[in-house]
Image: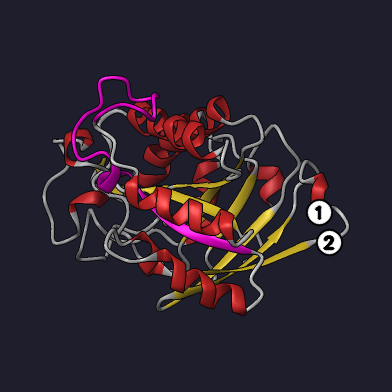
């Protein structure tokens, strides 16, 4: 995908690209480092894996991380589900010690990775029911795909994540997952002037802005990936019969993020080119 991201998106740090290729239960992560990642400046790439099952609460992370370690992966990407950690609204949402949060499974994942000296990248996504926008009509897609009514809630959770896991050595984060498809963010379009126009770039810009600030408020060493786009998309928005839940092609999504009034902050741009 040939896109001039520098021209489209303004950000406070030099541009880097994190490319994540997801296949079934695994992923290949290829990341160009930012200049702030000086510890490994001698090398230009990170190679890692994702195991989707590491996000499942009843899975023992140890054996799965052992298998990943045996493949010489440098980074493990783990989905950190907001909707699973915060099943009810916290009273102090930026405080990871709030009683509403259940970090038990992710504590096991992070501790198991630290024991094995493996680096983690946490992809934080999934809207809890209490945070969902009630104006979004129901659909066949999972409830966690409904956009948050208040993007600030996602930002508060990002701050809690960074405060809990930054001190444990986790400094790489992705803000949401594949927001250009309805499986992870709804709605994708809205009706305006008799036409379907993209809505998810505007929604995601607010989410990313809030989460970027939250991650950095909780962890000064945070590196935050934005975009996190899926490669799929429906080219004819007006002819698509699944509206408002048709997919936005990643190039169109990126261009929309660069539009007036958006341009959310990020340290790296992430894309899933599988």
Question: Between residues 138 and 190, which one lies in front from this camera angle?
Answer: 138
In the rendered image, is residue 179 in sight?
A: no
Name the quadrant of the N terminus. bottom right
Residue at the extreme right of the image, as rendered: 42
In reply to whether residue 88 is colored magenta, the answer given is yes
Q: Secondary structure at mark 2?
A: loop
Bounds of the magenta segment? 75-99
Q: Dot 2 surroundings within 10 Å: few (below 14), some, or many (20 or more)?
A: few
Q: Are marks 2 and 1 in contact (CB under 8 Å)?
A: yes
Pick whichever, 238 or 134, lies toward us: 134
Residue sitting at 41 percent across and 76 percent down? 25
Q: Is residue 28 above or below residue 180?
A: below
State the residue position of label 1.
Answer: 40
Q: Tell me if residue 231 can be seen.
A: yes
The residue at 12%/46% (across/down) is: 137
Image coordinates for residue 118, horizontal then vertical, percent: 61, 60
Q: Is residue 146 magenta?
A: no
Above-or-below relation of 35 to 167? below
* Residue matched to label 2: 43
In screen coordinates, is 212 left or right of 124? right
Expressed as whole percent of the image width and height from the top left, the position of residue 27 reads 51, 72
Of 110 and 12, which appears nearest the observer? 110
Secondary structure of residue under mark 1 = helix
User: At which x and y percent is residue 263?
Assistant: 56, 35
The spot of residue 167 in percent (x, y) is 58, 36
Query: For mark 1, does the 10 Å Cα neighbourhood hold few (<14), some (14 to 19), or many (20 or more) residues?
Result: few
- Give the colour scheme shown: secondary structure
Q: CA distance from mark 2 to mark 1?
A: 6 Å
Q: Residue at x 26, y 45 (%)?
A: 83
């Amino acid at each position: 995908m040939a896109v001039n991201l520098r021209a489209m998106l303004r950000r406070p740090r030099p541009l880097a690209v994190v490319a994540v290729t997801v296949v079934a239960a695994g992923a290949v992560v290829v990341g160009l480092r930012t200049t702030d990642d000086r510890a490994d400046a001698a090398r230009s790439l990170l190679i890692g894996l994702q195991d989707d099952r590491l996000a499942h609460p009843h899975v023992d992370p140890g054996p799965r991380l052992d298998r990943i370690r045996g493949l010489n992966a440098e980074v493990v990407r783990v989905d950190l589900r907001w909707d699973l950690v915060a099943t009810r609204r916290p009273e102090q949402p930026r405080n990871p010690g709030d009683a509403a949060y259940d970090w038990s499974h992710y504590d096991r994942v992070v501790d198991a990775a630290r024991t094995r000296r493996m680096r983690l990248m946490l992809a934080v996504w999934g809207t809890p029911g209490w945070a969902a926008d009630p104006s979004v009509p129901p659909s066949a897609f999972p409830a966690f795909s409904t956009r948050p009514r208040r993007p600030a809630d996602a930002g508060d959770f990002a701050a809690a994540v960074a405060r809990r896991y930054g001190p444990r050595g986790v400094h790489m984060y992705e803000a949401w997952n594949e927001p250009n498809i309805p499986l992870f963010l709804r709605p994708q379009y809205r009706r305006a002037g008799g036409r379907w126009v993209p809505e998810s770039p505007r929604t995601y810009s607010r989410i990313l802005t809030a989460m970027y600030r939250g991650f950095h408020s909780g962890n000064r060493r945070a590196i935050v990936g934005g975009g996190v786009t899926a490669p799929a998309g429906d080219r004819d928005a007006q002819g698509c019969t699944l509206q408002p839940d048709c997919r936005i092609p990643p190039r169109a999504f990126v261009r929309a993020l660069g539009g007036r009034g958006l341009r959310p902050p990020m340290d790296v741009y992430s894309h899933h080119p599988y």
